[in-house]
Image (cartoon, rainbow, N blue to C red):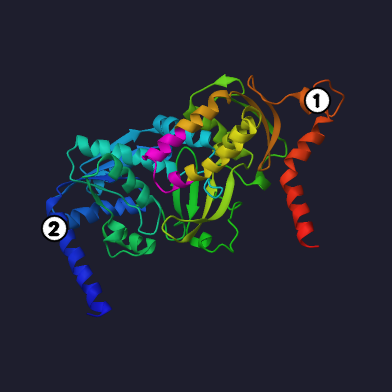
Amino acid sequence: MNISCIIICIKFIFQKETFKMANEIKKIVLAYSGGLDTSIIIPWLKENYPGCEVICMAGNVGQDSEIVGLEERAKKTGASKLYIEDIQDEFVNDFIFPTLKAGAKYEGYLLGTSFARPPIAKRLVEIAKKENADAICHGCTGKGNDQVRFELTIKALAPNLKIIAPWRIWDIKSRDQEIDYAEAHNVPIKITRETNYSKDMNLWHLSHEGLDLEDPANEPQYNKPGFLELGVSPEQAPDKPTYITISFEKGIPVALDGEKMDGVTLIKKLNKIGGANGIGLFDVVENRLVGMKSRGVYETPGGTILYHAHEVLETICLDKETQHYKAGLAQKYADLVYNGQWFTPLREAMDAFVDKTQETCTGDVKLKLYKGNIINAGVTSPYTLYSEDFASFGEDDVYDQKDSAGFINLFGLPIKVKALLDENRNK
């Protein structure tokens, strides 16, 4: 049997299974954003799953403006109802702050989309169980990471629930074809073919992909009106610096300039302050989980400030061995988050370690924000491990500099022994 015959057989089997599942599924819960992908999925589901009821769920993780008008649009395109679930507090306290405390970054990326998917998928599962749905549907493409993040969460929380991923089934192959489908089915969309960036907005960040950004040789159009949404470019930022002080308790930010506030409010305030000063722009070609490289531009003003402040505080609150070991763990933690493995025993075990390290990470960090730069302006903690008496270059009574000679002799002994033996062997 040649390759062509094998491919035809596989397609036949897949179509047969898809047809069988279509007849069995009568109620579907769709992860709905109102964007291009999920807007056309509603009529597509009605066409391909005859008689099915489509229930939409929009998880509000901080994209407040995008929530307006969603219910009307969802019902107009065929949904029976729309749940709008405000999960901002859960998103911040259960996902953002644990990742921040771990210091996790994926190739410099602060994981804005990555850790937003598990709480949304978790709420999807809860609604699917409440509605006795037969399946959950998402609009993630077959090339991206989000399909993995959604589906691993669903498998962890509802292993028997069916999953529908239209991008792996339908004949649509591009965003231009999606727009064609929307126009043919009278689906209202907000974008045009010229402004067709793929964007993801939440409380933590805004991502930009597609169009001219697909070529890494092209500089992002930071100064073009409308490109940046959370702030301005460093060139357009004020000529005067802005000073802020962030207070932490056990690694969690709890106050800004002495004013106590919840995590959602604090991040929103930092987004405004950071954005106005050109903070948090990040242009990267990242290694996707599915094997390809992808170029993205991220706006993360508040998150960039918080990561910087937390790292500064750890420099005086953690001992050397813990700080260095934690840095290695942070990379693995970032991999887990990026790859959608939030609901796993390893991530939970890592959190236990991180929480232990953060018991003394309490204090205040003062920062100067100026034209895209975050400049340290002071740090204090009641648990500081920094002693000016020991570190001083002036005269002191606590450190005998003669002690260093014996230390260097012992520390350098392996190097010296090897050099002596090599010298003897080479005679």
User: How many numbered marks have been drawn onto this rendered protein structure?
Assistant: 2
Q: Is residue 13 left or right of residue 174?
A: left
**Marks 2 and 1: in contact by CB < 8 Å?**
no
Please state which amino acid type lies under the numbered disc 2.
Lys
Q: Is residue 123 visible?
A: yes
Please state which amino acid type lies under the numbered disc 1.
Tyr
- Badge 1: how crowded within 10 Å, few (<14), some, or many (20+)? few
In the displayed structure, would residue 178 be above or below residue 404? below
Residue 356 coordinates in the image, percent (x, y): 51, 27
Residue 110 coordinates in the image, percent (x, y): 52, 43
Residue 2 coordinates in the image, percent (x, y): 25, 80
Residue furthest to the right: 395
Q: Mark 1 points at which residue?
A: 399
Which one is in front, 114 or 80?
114
**The stretch drawn in magenta includes residue 164:** no
Q: Mark 2 points at which residue?
A: 20
Which one is in front, 260 or 41?
260
Q: What stretch is highlighted in magenta?
A: 335-351
Which one is in front, 396 or 158?
396
**The stretch drawn in magenta includes residue 340:** yes
In the displayed structure, would residue 125 be above or below residue 366? below
Q: Is residue 85 left or right of residue 61?
A: left
How far is the residue under mark 1 from the one under mark 2?
78 Å
Residue at image point 44% right, 45% down? 336
Q: In this view, does 423 lie to the left or right of 163?
A: right
In the displayed structure, would residue 139 be above or below residue 80? below
Residue at image point 42% right, 61% down? 193
